[in-house]
Amino acid sequence: MGNNMIIPFHNPRNNNAGNPPLRLNRINQPLSMNQQYPPAHFIVVWMVLLLAIFSGCEKFKGDQTIPAYITIDSIYLSTSPSIQGSASAAITDAWVFINDVQIGTFQLPARFPVLHQGTQTVKVLPGIKQNGVAATRASYPFFAPVEITVELNELDTAALGVLKTTYISTTVFDMIEGFEGVTLLLDTTN
């Protein structure tokens, strides 16, 4: 048993009439009043634990949708170097939409489940790390989205492979500097 025992205590003055028995410790000394009952947080913890155990989870009822999967290996940028500059781009993410509803943002290469079946239009927006910071990811507004029509079936994988994007047609390049020529377009300042 525990450290505390309930032992009837006889008080000869009032003959212990109507009083509950005192709780005594191992050396037969009465416990203080705040030691007589368990602390409130102890009771709350036990109640929460019992509630969690007996409430439990139920399995889903009814028909369950079995997902199809989509894989994207990478996305690269294709440019016209003379008017758009280098095709160097750090595209790290894919922002995926199916029928113009966002499915999610996935780090490349990606394999992800979708709950759509049949012929679907998949739109992929190339994503970058804003200012090179991994915690701030965004779809790059100057890259054109990639749209593909795919057939999705339960448990099958639609492999989109390596996707190609370009700059959107309204992008204007005021200056193109590759830093590889004999002269630079940049001027020095004082």
Image: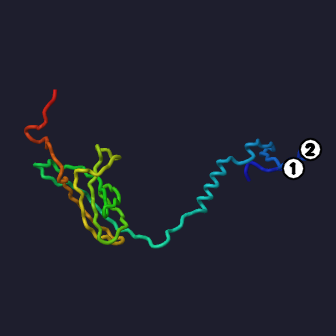
Q: Quadrant of the C terminus?
A: top left
Asked which secondary structure carries label 2, the reply is loop
The amino acid pointed to by label 2 is Pro
Crowdedness near tag 1: few (<14), some (14–19) or many (≥20) residues, C-alpha within 10 Å: few
**Which color mode does the image show?**
rainbow
Residue lying farthest to the top in this orientation? 190
Q: Which mark is residue 44?
A: none
Quick check: 86 above or below 111? Answer: above
Task: Residue type at mark 1: give it.
Answer: Gly
Give SS at disc 1: loop
Q: Which residue is mark 2?
A: 12
Instruction: Name the residue: 21% across, 56% down.
Output: 165
Considering depth in this image, is 120 or 114 the residue closer to the camera?
A: 120
Q: Nearer the viewer, mark 2 or mark 1?
A: 1
The residue under the point 92% across, 44% down is 12
- The earlier-in-sequence mark between 2 and 1 is 2
Residue 4 horizontal/vertical position (percent): 75, 48
Return the residue nearer the eye: 64 or 71.
Answer: 64
| Residue holding disc 1 | 18
Decide if residue 53 is on the left or right side of residue 188.
right
Residue at x 76%, y 42% (from the top left corner): 33
Q: Position of residue 81 (x, y in %)?
A: 12, 50
